[in-house]
Image: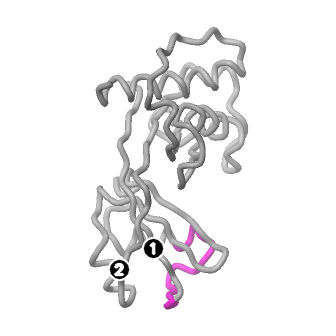
Amino acid sequence: MSTDALGTSLLCLARNAIGERFSLPPSPVTPQPEHRQRAATFVTLTQHGDLRGCIGSLEAHRPLAEDVSENALAAAFRDPRFAPLRAEEFEHTHVEVSLLTPATPLQFSDEDDALRQLQPGRDGIVLQHGRRRATFLPQVWESLPAPDLFLRQLKRKAGLPEDFWDSDIALFRYHVRKWKEA
């Protein structure tokens, strides 16, 4: 299946999962072999260009179709930053699906070394320190284009001070293929 066809099917699966909660008839989606493969995805919802929900999986632990559907429902109804999506908002809500590659550890000697290795616009990053963990998708580089700002805000998202650094910080890099509704 072509990448465009895969993206179209994933966007449709996400929209159908949310629409089902509002008793809307689903659009047809032809099952594809990729839908059964384990994959990690994020589903991002926007309204008028503003974030309205974003939830995902960092590791592939269920089939792609299920991951997209469950993450779409979570982004619409369980993102703690937003009230649950209302039916009257749904037609003005745009869906984006990001399919993640497996994350690989970043090897670095200190924070400056880590910053030099970040690839703006390309890398999704997971930061982990003890029980704290946070990620930014590569799309976040659009609003945080400088590596130092990107990393400071990622630390903040993980519940750490922006100027925090410790030799036990772990960073992981991943990339995405993404598709967004027009």
Q: Which mark is residue 83?
A: none
Q: Secondary structure at mark 2?
A: helix
Give, as a three-letter code, the residue at label 2. Answer: Ala
Residues marked 1 and 2 touching at CB (< 8 Å): yes
Is the magenta region chiefly helix, strand or loop?
loop
In front here: 42 or 95?
Answer: 42
Image position of 72 with respect to 157: above or below? above
First in sequence: mark 1 vs mark 2: 2
Give, as a three-letter code, the residue at label 1. Answer: Leu
**Part of the protein shown in magenta:** 155-167
The local crowd at label 2, few if under 14, some if 14 to 19, many if 20 or more residues have their Cα within 10 Å, is some
Q: Is residue 31 left or right of residue 16?
A: left
Q: Is residue 166 magenta?
A: yes
Image position of 151 with respect to 48: above or below? below
Q: Which mark is residue 114?
A: 2
Which residue is the site of mark 1?
171
Between marks 1 and 2, how big is the CA–CA gap?
A: 8 Å
Q: Secondary structure at mark 1?
A: strand
Expressed as whole percent of the image width and height from the top left, the position of residue 158 reads: 59, 70
Expressed as whole percent of the image width and height from the top left, the position of residue 166 reads: 52, 90
Expressed as whole percent of the image width and height from the top left, the position of residue 28 reads: 51, 10
Q: Quadrant of residue 62?
A: top right
Expressed as whole percent of the image width and height from the top left, the position of residue 155 reads: 53, 73
